[in-house]
Image: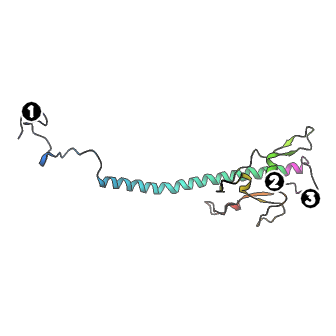
């Protein structure tokens, strides 16, 4: 047995050592293969739970954006119709009173009751349909249009814009089709 000298010197007993001088109390720095496998498995389980939640959150966000865009454009269409009913927009025989295009909501129309011929504008810009994946389309081309003369079950474009809808065939989180909103 070692009895003299400081730590790790001849003559000083080494506490907690086994055969060949290996320590029972100290480990080399690093992780074992089992520890790494357990860690990777835990991370994979957590990721498998988080990814569907993240997708649902993104979908819910897009659905809220779609609702807001539809509400804004429909309110603008209704405001245009109200202005036409109030006599602020020039009336022509055969007109329904609805805007001829989405562009008319942004570009505006002349207020015939204004002495200065002011323009009535109903939208600042046409929003993009968040459910339309085609980035090459302009915002107004991402929407489906329904004219006043078309049937509600089979919307068709026509001489005016009575309503707008999403062209997406996908379903919402509640199971309804986006195009039916």
Q: Earlier in the sequence, mark 2 or mark 1?
A: 1
Count all numbered tags in the image, as a single digit: 3
Q: Are marks 3 and 1 in contact (CB under 8 Å)?
A: no
Residue 154 on image: x %, y %: 77, 66
The residue carrying mark 1 is 5
- The residue labelled by disc 2 is 101
Give 171 or 32, whichever is nearer the viewer. Answer: 32
Q: Which residues are magenta?
A: 81-100
The local crowd at label 3, few if under 14, some if 14 to 19, many if 20 or more residues have their Cα within 10 Å, is: few
The percent coordinates of residue 146 (x first, y second) are: 79, 60
Could you tell me which secondary element the residue under label 1 belongs to? loop
Q: Is residue 65 left or right of residue 47?
A: right
Measured as percent of width and height from the top left, residue 138 is found at: 71, 52
Mark 2 residue crowding within 10 angstroms, few (<14) / some (14–19) / many (20+): some
Q: Which class describes the residues within 10 Å of circle 1: few (<14), some (14-19), or many (20+)?
A: few
Rendered view: 174 above or below 139: below
Mark closer to the observer (2, 3): 2
Residue 126 bears which disc, if any? none
Q: Secondary structure at mark 3?
A: loop
Is tag 3's residue or tag 1's residue first in the polypeptide sequence?
1
Residue lying furthest right: 93
Determine the residue positioned at 61% across, 51% down: 61
Q: Which residue is mark 3?
A: 94
Q: Is residue 83 magenta?
A: yes
Residue at position x 42%, y 56% from top? Answer: 44
């Amino acid at each position: 047995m070692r009895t003299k000298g400081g730590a790790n010197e001849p003559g000083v007993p080494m506490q907690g050592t086994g055969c060949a001088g290996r320590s029972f109390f100290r480990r080399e720095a690093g992780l074992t293969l089992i520890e790494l496998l357990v860690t990777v498995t835990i991370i994979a389980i957590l990721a498998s739970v988080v990814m569907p939640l993240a997708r649902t959150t993104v979908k819910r966000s897009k659905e809220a954006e779609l609702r807001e865009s539809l509400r804004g454009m429909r309110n603008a269409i209704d405001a245009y119709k109200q202005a036409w009913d109030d006599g602020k927009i020039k009336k022509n025989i055969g007109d329904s009173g609805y805007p001829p295009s989405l562009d008319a909501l942004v570009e505006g129309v002349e207020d015939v009751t204004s002495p200065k011929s002011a323009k009535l504008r109903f939208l600042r810009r046409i929003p993009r349909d968040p459910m339309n994946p085609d980035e090459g389309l302009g915002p107004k081309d991402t929407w489906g249009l329904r004219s006043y003369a078309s049937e509600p079950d089979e919307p068709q474009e026509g001489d005016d814009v009575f309503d707008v809808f999403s062209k997406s065939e996908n379903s919402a989180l509640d199971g309804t089709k986006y195009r039916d909103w």
